[in-house]
Amino acid sequence: MDTKAVFATLYSVCEENATFFSGGAKGSQGDAARRLVDSMKLIQEHARSLEPVISGFAAVYHHFDFDPHIPANGYRSLVKVVRCCLLHIIHKGRYIAANRRSIFFRVAHNAGEMEAYCNALCQLRALLYLAQRMLHDNSHGNLFFPDESGLSESFVREYASMHKGCFYGRCLGFQFTPAIRPFLQTIAIGLVAFGENYRRHQSGIGVAASSFFTSGKYAIDPELRGAEFERITQNLDVHFWKTFWNITETEVLTSLASMTSTQVKVNRALSVPPEPFDLPLVDNHKASVTISPPSAHIGPAPVQMRLISYDLREGQDSETLLSLCRSEGGAISLSLGLKTKRFPSSPCLLIHFHGGGFVAQTSKSHEPYLKSWSQDLGVPILSVDYSLAPEAPFPRALEECFYAYCWALRNHHLLGWTGEKVCLAGDSAGGNLCVTTSMRAAAFGVRMPDGIVAAYPATLLTAYASPSRLLTLMDPLLPLSVLSRCLSAYAGNEPQTEKQVEKVSTLSLVRRESAMLLRGASNWIQSLLDPNRASSSTKTADAQPGATDAVRKSISEATLFSPHADPPVLSDAAQFPTRKLSVKSQTCQDLGSHNSCASYTAPLLSEHTAPENVSFFLSKDSDPYISNNLSSVAIPPPIVEEESEVDYPREFPLGFEPLRSEQLAEMKVQSSPVVKDPFCSPLLAPDSMLKGLPPLHIVACALDPMLDDSVMFAKRLRSLDQPVTLCIVDDLPHGFLSLSHEFVLPSPRRTRPGSHASTTSWNGPIGVCRPLLGKLDLSSSILLREGNSLMGEGLNLLMGRA
């Protein structure tokens, strides 16, 4: 159905129902009927204003696609969400028209449904006006902005004050495939119930158990659920989200997941001691670079990993590897029966970095699909359990991932790997770490991975506004307030404290009483980690006099950023044996005169400086035809009226104002210079740091608030002639990899590199996809398999198995 037909049908359905219910009914039925009529009329008013805006965007948003075969960008996503809302209203209106004469028809219930979607349409109208402002500031295919002009501040200010509860109640997840909605409702109900009991217990499992008995009211009353969801997302800090997301790490849930997932021969948690070692340089194999153990913030500590292999391979049962295994309090996960067949070492290794916003989860949360990967790919997988923020902010996670990568290169014989091919894979935050680990490998001059597969990666950790990031207003998994808290924690800023919330319902219980209670609420998370690491005291990195605490550098990071950077080595000579200097242990500085692998100089970006050779915004000569098309849709920045009582300009046309929230969110634009560091935000890296990256296969979601990160990063790499493919999955949310246990590889027939994926064009075998919570219908199963298959296709291509 084209745009004109959608709006014509909407007007007809609303007008017909409004005329029918405009009769003279009295009492409660009359009040409900009047509410229904008012909603229908207001929907028509919003639609009349939206129709020319939608048509205008439809005429220009193709200018921002990655290429003609991949129609995806934030502007398209916004238009798609609005159309989806309109279609839901049409569907609901037709239901009302067909059943309004029935004695079982509930006028009040249907009035509530239409009011909810009317409110959602009002807020979407506001988002499109903000998108028009973005279109004015960016006119040549860029989805972020060379000159912010206060745009990010405007976006954050509007987000903090706009009403969002309508998207978390009756309209929850309306933009996604219908079968995902029960899953999202379960998450939302669990979240608000968890928030009600958060301060009553000191363990996550205790809160979860109590939440089970208080969740009924939120399932019955969607308005209450939406209001509570909005309050929680706006007022609770990162420690709450860390505790909630790590419920999946509890022994009960992990045991259930283990029983239903693929059974593997090897599944061992490893604890690698923090010892320096040497790796040969790529350009000069006679020389080497010293890889120092991670030391940022919490000092040297063992690096935690997990080795998963479907088959037992040579070296995986060696005494050396077994000495590195750490107990998880469960049964031994390495099957070494007398009749266990030992397979030869695999020519490929997959190193995995998990997602979780840099603040939550471990490899156990991602273990089900990692086991399936190991079976279907026939390779061992090494998943890194890097330290989490805010206890261990940037660059600790990057240091540990890089150290684990280098350790795997040096000890391939222990992992059942021949040392031939190695690929990196990760989702969300893990996708960021895949790219930055490769950049760090290039800076050190060591071997690069043979390929990267990144699912919905976060490549820009600043608060820059973009069209897709407007979706954080309604996304139940990535609200902007939650996303900003996670990124703030990773950047090393002080944790945000919770404000006192004035309310008469359950969130009066959700207040921060003391730091000790907060620590007690997250102690169960630390029990999953090594006791030494959990108990290590946080150390601040050395800084120059007068430097702010927000700009933190580890010993290794400081040396890497130095203009004459040596490979990072610990300054405490007594902690490790002294090494003799030889050709093998020459530093990059010593080798700088006769090879090109010297450490790359990557200065820490500040708010006021940027690398000279950054071509992030892909500026091109203005095309008059394109400019005319965009100017017909874009609106210029607002002007502050001289007699206005506010200090900031009006963002919306006269006569329109979005719904405002009663409880404002405490938010501010990220100001730490750390988020502009290229090893934190690879999208901001200079061209010289991105050239030479291995082939990158990106799988993104069309409705993901981080979609523009993927599109713009792929554009940057393509502009540098770097091998990159971008695949888009429709109608799935951020984090879809965690929605199913099964990961099924695609059939030998694969999509063309860089092609757009859809449920109708996928030709893989149809199977059963087992979700984590509840049952999904066949269409959703196919959709999940499609997203997972695109990940598998990338892995197969990079490992040379296509």
Image (cartoon, rainbow, N blue to C red):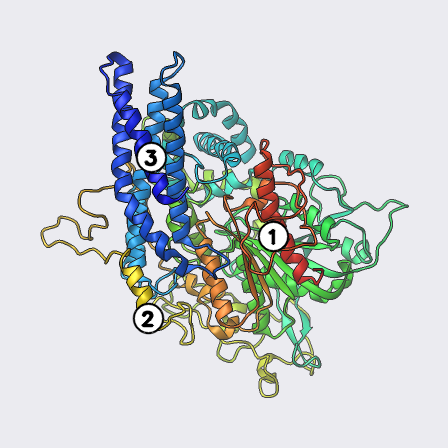
- The disc, 1 or 3, on the residue closer to the chain's N-terminal end is 3
Residue 255: x and y in percent read 68, 36
Say which amino acid is labelled 3.
Leu
Q: CA distance from mark 3 to mark 2?
A: 38 Å
Residue hosting label 3: 10
- The disc, 3 or 2, on the residue closer to the chain's N-terminal end is 3
Q: Residue at x 64, y 66 (%)?
A: 449
Of helix, strand and loop, which one carries label 2? loop
Residue 360 in view (yes/no): yes
Which disc, if any, is residue 790? 1
Q: Quadrant of the N terminus?
A: top left
Q: Looking at this rendering, what residue extends furthest in the right direction? A: 338
Which disc, if any, is residue 285? none
Residue hosting label 2: 622
Say which amino acid is labelled 2.
Ser
**Residue 421 in which image quadrant:** bottom right
Say which amino acid is labelled 1.
Leu
Identify which residue, 458 or 273, lies in the foreground: 458
Q: Are marks 1 and 3 in contact (CB under 8 Å)?
A: no
Q: Residue at x 20, y 48 (%)?
A: 653
Of helix, strand and loop, which one carries label 3? helix
Rendered position, 162 above or below 186 = below
